[in-house]
Image (cartoon, helix red, strand yellow):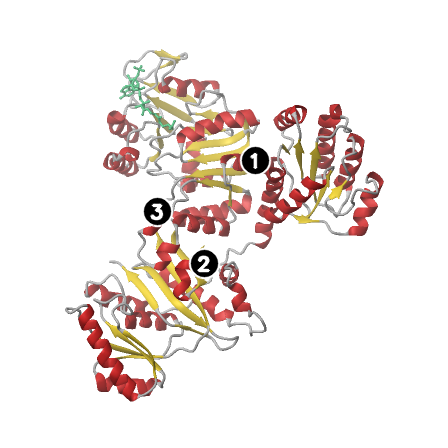
Amino acid sequence: MKRESHIRSLFEPRSVAVIGASAKPGKIGYSVVRNIVQGGFKGKIFPVNPQGGEILGLPVHASVAAIGEPIDVASVIVPAKLAFSAVKDCADSGVKNIQIITSGFSEIGEVELERRIVDYARSRGARILGPNIFGVFSATSHFNSTFSASAITPGRVAILTQSGALGIAMIGKTAVENMGLSTIVSIGNKADIDEADCLEYVMEQEETRVILMYIEGVKDGERLIERVRGATWKKPVVVVKSGRSRRGALAAASHTGSLAGSDEIFDAVMKQCGVMRAESLQEAFDWCKFLANAPEPKGTSGVIVTNGGGVGVLATDACEKYGVELYDDQGALKEVFAPVTPDFGSTKNPVDITGGANSAAYNLALSATAAHPAMHCTMALYCETATFDSENLVPMLRATYDAHDKAGKPVVYAVVGGAPVEDAIVTLRKENIPVYGDTYSAISCMGSLHRYHRFNRERDDQIDLADIDVAAIDAVIDGALADGRGFLLANEGQSVMRAAGIPIPGAAIAKGMDDAVAQARAIGYPVVMKVVSRDILHKSDAGGVALDIENDGEVVDAYQAIMRNCRAYKPDAIIDGIEICEMVAKGTELIVGARRDPQMGPIVMCGLGGIYVEVMKDVSFRAAALSRGEALKMLSEIRSYALLLGVRGEDQKDIAPVVDTIIKAATIIRSVSRITDIEINPVVVYEKGMGIKAVDVRILVRK
Ligand code: ACO
């Protein structure tokens, strides 16, 4: 059976068994049966409890096997110690999906029990949702197998949540907000089915117009990336993720690792996929509710109409922050708004119809924006004034919202004032009119709408790969692993660079003093000399580096000094030789890195390099599945990008080979699974046409 249809059977089952169904109100096993029955589910419902009897008029079966009919979903609500045997009975009876509401598994360290349950179910072709969940709701099938206390109003927003408690709270909040749900599913410990699987369902579900995900941690980032990329083509996806902590990152082994606080990677990758990350649940709810109802804007130009200069300025700032462009044809603005704007107001955008404006003035101004073909969205602001006919506030907002609705044009309102204004907000939000008590909240919603459509207009899902010699890289790694090392030596790192076609300075390993002189002559002075030793990772600290060596005599002196220093630093260090390198001319120093992130999979990084890399933290990240265009975008996001464009009359730097290097690093990390971290620092970038040099590279490998 195809996976898609399997996941659909979890949300739209034809039959459901409740294992641990209870006749006692107040127990979860009772609430689930009640919600399935009262939710209007049209399929068959089989309560299961060895005690038998009846629950809500339904006969109770002694076991799943006793049902004797095919079961699409079984909801397991027995204590954890009975869960394996309950799942076994279900899987042996051919149940397709088993949702385990029970807690007490990996979340409290019972990892082995959870793994045994999943392994057994999978071996019988069953999938597990949970454990530690509150259940599933789908408006399509009127299926509510949650133990939510309140009924769920059907609507257009799908919620996938890792936290069950938060999910239940969100059901309550959606009711208050009058935000109907198309689906809500709690994924819990996601021992088997995860958010990527559930996305597969909601992205195709007709009722869903917006998807909201609450994520605590990602287990299989590569799959999630692939799914959200597919989902954002079809509908907006909003995510709230907890855990911005950097503690985990401190343990990372390389610079790339320590810079890559996993939250920053998550953030960057979600943006790359067109997922909109909300800062808070309230922001996420505001966006989802707005996105579920707002029409697609026909263009990018917005108009702000206000009766207060201050909020007008606030709104203008918010438009810049949230990416809403403002209509700028001064002639047209004057023509449209002069009839409702006193001389001391302003027809410039923000249009200030002044504190004397009443509901009639607002009606006129907002009907005009609704009707104007070049004004694509409206942000209407109202500050409570003594001159406004406040009894007409709600009718004015309703009427102008309807005018926009009829014109297929998005509008948001920010209204500020006392109790009557607050009451108006509550009343109108229940009618799904996008009214907010704060300018930034209103405009962040409008921004989310524009951001979603702009992303899809400009999106670039192409994956560019470079032509690299994977066999040569594998051979280098074989050598390092055979040697018992989890990292590559400098010369091995250079071999990897050569295999990927990344330009490196001329270099050779000298095995003795005479060889060092010969190699230095062959490379050409000036040169740099560095110790090569698996026992000395930080060469400068050991006095194992000599710069700017100009002639044969200096080679001899430096050779002796390095040997002496390194022996003193670590007497038992095995020294494989001295590396003689071309002395690289100065240029702009960048860092390019790639790593296999434990959560998000292969990622790439670029940023300002050299010795300040960790101080400046001027870096950007992407999933390693990216195009050259995206690599350039990533580079242009760093603050130091201006240095590459050339400052104070400098020539522009050679950006194209930097983009090549990013793509090559991405290709290595995607194609060579034994490499976990690559860090090329510095990548020295010269003027346009003069190329780059990858001066130093650190590569970590694993078996
Ligand atoms: N097959 C079917 N029914 C059985 C079986 C069996 N093999 N064995 C026992 N039962 C019956 C019991 O007789 C009982 O029925 P009864 O009410 O008629 O007596 C019923 O199953 C439940 O068993 P209890 O021992 O009474 O367990 P209880 O209901 O107290 O707790 C529960 C079970 C709810 C699964 C509990 O162990 C648990 O995990 N609670 C937490 C649930 C949770 O919060 N999940 C996360 C949700 S998300 C969030 O964070 C809110």
Closer to viewer: mark 1 or mark 2:
2
Q: Determine whether the residue tagged by mark 3 lies in a helix, strand or loop.
A: helix
Q: Amino acid at mark 3?
A: Arg
Ranked by sequence position, the earlier of labels 1 and 2 is: 1
Asked if 167 appears above or below 335 in the picture, the reply is above
Q: Nearer the viewer, mark 1 or mark 3?
A: 3
Give the quadrant of the N terminus.
top left
Q: Residues within 10 Å of mark 1 (few under 14, many from 20)?
A: many
Q: Which residue is mark 1?
A: 286
For the residue marked with disc 2, what is the amino acid?
Val
Q: Identify which residue is drawn at 44% across, 59% down.
A: 616
- For marks 3 and 2, give the CA distance: 19 Å
Residue under label 2: 619
Res. 87 image quadrant: top left
Q: State the CA–CA distance, disc 1 to disc 3.
A: 31 Å
**In this orientation, which residue lies closer to the viewer: 104 or 261?**
261
Q: Quadrant of ligand 1?
A: top left
Q: Position of residue 319 (x, y in %)?
A: 64, 46
Look at the numbered disc 2 and give the secondary structure of its residue.
strand
Q: Which mark is residue 247?
A: 3
The image quadrant that residue 68 belongs to is: top left
Residue 150 drawn above or below residue 7: above
Q: Position of residue 654 (x, y in %)?
A: 51, 72
As helix, strand or loop, the secondary structure at mark 1 comes to helix
